Amino acid sequence: LIPATSPWISALRDAAGTVLGPTQALVHAATQPLRNLSDYAESNSALRDDVARLSSQNSQLQRKADQADLDRARLVELEGLHKMTNQTGLRLIPARVVATGPLQSFSRTVSLDVGSRQGIGKDMTVVNKDGLVGRVIAVSDSSATVLLIVDTNSVVGGRLGSSNEIGFLRGRGAINDSGRLDLDMVDDSVTPSLDDLVVTWGSNGNGPYVAGVPIGKVESVYSTPGQLGKHAVIKPLADFSALDVVGVVVPKAGVTR
């Protein structure tokens, strides 16, 4: 056996250090980028996880904020319906608009989330906090279809607020901001005044329209060649492109239609 302190062993160790030392340094230098890449991958993966987590939290907060805005808007609508109830003495069943009629059709309707189980029936008046919306034309157990007053097949009896003169309003079919109604007076000698308020003059048995509900205001007055009477363009008070919370007028307790 060769002693550990043998000059041969020392010489071999020195030789190995001379040969392997640079080699180890070279291997360390060569593998350093791989270690750095691994560290980068781990850091980048953690960063992606943080971004995904923060993005999810942000989306949740945004949804809560959007829902809060919607809830506030609906609260305003409900408070408006309550105010209308106090002012008119009407009994209203609150409802939400859950669908609109197909744009491809010529009919302007919306669907409500209440039906016969809540006491809703055909030919009931529908309002929102601003004014008249339409009338119920079809009912199921849990839903109702409303024909909007802007529909071309809708005819509503209206009364000028300033003079009590009566006429008939017909829709033009548009539900956006350009949606208007045409008012034809029963008395051809009557000329509606600009900005005059038009309200419903009611129907027999309060159906399909109860009396005294605001409809809109006179926006312009025009005449038609060959006809004696004046016609008025009415801008509705209700925004038909943003209907959400509405109220269905139902008979008071103990009152039948």
Image (cartoon, rainbow, N blue to C red):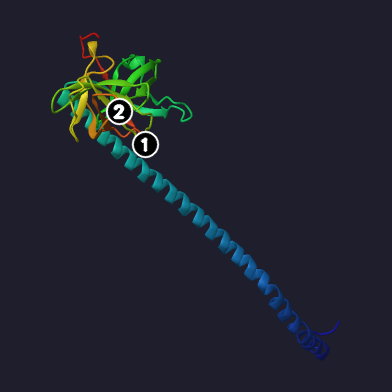
Identify the disc placed on residue 164: none
Q: Position of residue 222 (x, y in %)?
A: 26, 32
Is residue 64 in view from this perspective? yes
Q: Badge 2: few (under 14), some or many (20 or more) residues near its Cα, within 10 Å?
A: few
Residue receiving disc 1: 176
Rendering coords of residue 163 (x, y %): 13, 25
Estimate the x, y position of residue 123 in percent, counting from the top left: 32, 15
Q: Secondary structure at mark 2?
A: loop
The amino acid sitting under disc 2 is Pro
Q: Which residue is labeled 2 in the image?
A: 225
Q: Residue furthest left?
A: 163
The residue positioned 51% from the left and 53% from the top of the image is: 52
Residue name at image x 81 percent, y 85 percent: 3
Nearer the observer, 28 or 164: 164
Q: Is residue 94 visible?
A: no
Find residue 22 and report its image quarter.
bottom right
Front one among 178 and 85: 178
Separation of disc 1 and disc 2 at Cα? 29 Å
The residue shown at (21%, 14%) is 252
Say if 91 sits above or below 22 in the image: above
Q: At label 1, which amino acid type do we have?
A: Asn
Single out the residue that lies furthest toward the front: 226
Q: Residues within 10 Å of mark 1 (few under 14, many from 20)?
A: few
Q: Quadrant of residue 2?
A: bottom right
**Image side of residue 141 versus residue 216, left or right:** right
Identify the secondary structure beneath mark 1. Answer: loop
Q: Nearer the viewer, mark 1 or mark 2?
A: 2
Q: Quadrant of residue 48?
A: bottom right
**Going by the image, does 37 lie left or right of 2?**
left
Question: Cβ–Cβ below 8 Å for labels 1 and 2?
Answer: no
Q: Nearer the viewer, residue 188 or 176?
A: 188
